[in-house]
Image (cartoon, rainbow, N blue to C red):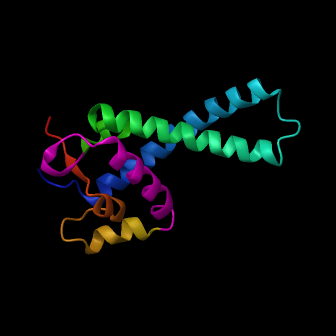
Amino acid sequence: MNTPGILRRLAAMMYEGTLLFGVAFVSTALFLFAGGGTSGLEGWRHVALQVYLGAVFAGYFLWCWLRGGQTLAMKAWNIRLIAPMHTRVPPGKALLRFVLAVLLVPSGIGILWAFFDHERQFLHDRLVGTRLVSVER
């Protein structure tokens, strides 16, 4: 199985960001509705919203990766997440990949790594032992 190009993976990440904006919008609306609106959205309520959104995002990615190795954006760009030996990703690896991606991708380190990696994998995939592969249609 071959590794999708870096530009293709970045395009999928951009698409993923657009989808996550919608997920965050709806999730925030539900949070505010359940919590009585925006008044008093500072202090612990602000932190609670951030934790809630982090859990929603983690749930989205884990559900997609554990069910078939693809989020909606990954399906659109024909990319799949696999574990060694081309198997499904175990829950622990999926969670660790999510956490490392959240930490490494915004800094750019995780993406820059792919330019120097011999298989062009992102740093969080290299550290967890997962890989992104092209899906044949």
Q: Does the magenta stretch include residue 20?
A: no
102 and 26: which is toward the camera: 102
Q: Does the magenta stretch include residue 98?
A: yes
Q: Which residue is drawn at 33% across and 49% down?
A: 93
Q: Residue furthest bottom?
A: 116
Residue 11 percent coordinates (x, y): 37, 51
Residue 23 percent coordinates (x, y): 55, 34
Q: Residue at x 25, y 43 (%)?
A: 80
Residue 111 percent coordinates (x, y): 38, 65
Q: Which residue is drawn at 75% across and 24% down?
A: 34
Asked if residue 31 lies left or right of residue 114, the reply is right
Image quarter for residue 6? bottom left
Q: Residue furthest right?
A: 39
Q: How many marks?
A: 0
Asked if residue 104 lies left or right of residue 94, the reply is right
Q: Quadrant of the C terminus?
A: top left
Residue 37 percent coordinates (x, y): 82, 29
Q: Identify the main secondary structure in magenta.
A: helix
Q: Residue at x 45, y 68 (%)?
A: 108
Image quarter for residue 127? bottom left
Q: Give the range drawn in magenta.
A: 82-107
Asked if residue 133 lies left or right of residue 46, the reply is left
